[in-house]
Amino acid sequence: MEDRADLLRQIPAVHELAEALRQKFPKAPERLITAAARNATDTLRREILEGKRKELSREEALSRAESFLAEKLRPNLRRVINATGVVVHTNLGRSLLPQEAVEAVKEIATRYSNLEFDLKTGKRGSRYVHVEEILLELTGAEAALVVNNNAAAVLLTLNTLAAGKEVIVSRGELVEIGGSFRIPDVMARSGAILREVGATNRTHLRDYEAAINENTALLMKVHKSNYAIVGFTKEVSGKELVELGRRYGLTVVEDLGSGCFVDFSRYGLPKEPTVQEVLATGVDVVTFSGDKLLGGPQAGLILGRKELVAAIRKNPLNRAVRIDKMTLAALEAVLALYRDETEAISKIPTLAMITKKPEEIKKEALRLKRRLKRALPQDVTLQVVETISRVGGGALPLASPRSYAVALKSTRLSAAALEEALRRASPPVIARIEEDTLLLDLRTVLPVEHPEIVAALTKIFNEAGGDCSYPVDH
């Protein structure tokens, strides 16, 4: 008991720890400084009383307080380095914005804007006009509306055009994407009634025609953007649905999911229908995402016939899912790049990563390997290996673009331990493991991030007892 009493007396006073924290974190809020100091003293006191501690130092108490304060000051939403090779990584924020979009967001976010003000008339305007004109220019659509994501675009479209009525969809197109978003569930919430036709692998035009009745509102096609059915298959094309819809006076809607403006087959990737091609079939309404293959911010785009888009815009639900000013600014900047496909491919990060040649990735992997070899202990095995990347984001499921990765193996740290340590780095590095080897896929790593990866691994091995020295040329 006397030992515990002695240890308790050695706990620094709250005001003493707080003063030390003020010196190291001069911009930290006073309430967080006090909370950190109290947390450290309370934790140490509890450990002593529970017999978990036999000695104590002021340095350790201060370290506890500093760790607590640093954690509180660190944002929850943080930048990470994506070394997984998955370009449109849903869990890591999907598409990166081009610099032009970043500057546009900064301009609009830090100043007043004409978001809903008509500069020509001096009267109230509409936020939707800011991207409609360029969307019509790029796609040939009659009208356009943008909401906050594609799920909202589908929900709003169905609620406007089919509430209380039947929507005919092929059974093989009742998709589910990340976050348990299912077409049948969204349809039910919209008030539309799902009418499934066909089989999982084969649906014929006659299946749609046989299901049409007096309560049918529209025919819907859902693009299977996140999976593929191969083998004994049959699906009805959008053009065929349009022809059927015209015969029966029915609206035809197509949800593209990951809509794109570029024909990726020209860059050695599987063919994906572009928005322009789908609209050219005569489909009445097309919906798709802004933050997947388009490479922009999260948004849901609705394009199609003028009278239908006008009706969708007037739906009261539109206000609940409307797009905000920063997303509009980013989207307009991204769309402007599509006026020149070469510029879009080079400046929009998602497009640049997807179309990047394996030979270029290999060169970057070799450069990173050389830097790591100079920095890490000799027992770390480093190799540049050929691997397969993924487009991600529920897009191009059959695409397997070749890539190169730096493979790491260590005698002192398992691949799992390395992966966890990198996740805890600052900034976190998100890698993947294959056959008990840590892989850093260079398709999704920016060149400016190489020094941070080297620094993170250097620190990890130093803390693991390695003899690491950071390279001079970092």
Image: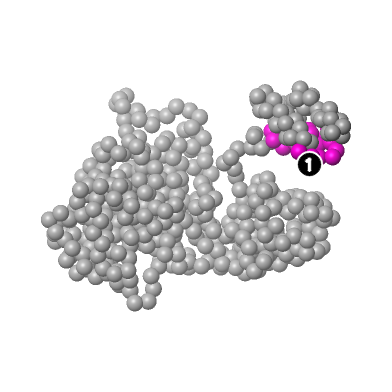
In the displayed structure, would residue 421 be above or below residue 65? below
| Quarter of the view holding residue 326 | top left
Image quadrant occupied by the N terminus: top right
Residue at the location (48% across, 28% down)?
111
| Coordinates of residue 153 in the picture (x, y in percent) | 33, 47
Residue at the location (25% across, 56% down)?
194
Residue at the location (44% across, 52% down)?
179
Label 1 residue SS: loop
Type of secondary structure dominating the magenta stretch: helix
Which sits in the foreground, 196 or 241? 196
| Coordinates of residue 28 in the picture (x, y in percent) | 67, 27
Which sits in the foreground, 348 or 195? 195
The range drawn in magenta is 50-69
Amino acid of disc 1? Lys
Horizontal arrangement in the rendering, residue 9 relative to residue 385 (left or right) = right
Magenta stretch containing residue 160, yes or no? Answer: no
Horizontal arrangement in the rendering, residue 340 relative to residue 76 (left or right) = left
Which sits in the foreground, 15 or 1? 1
| Quarter of the view holding residue 37 | top right
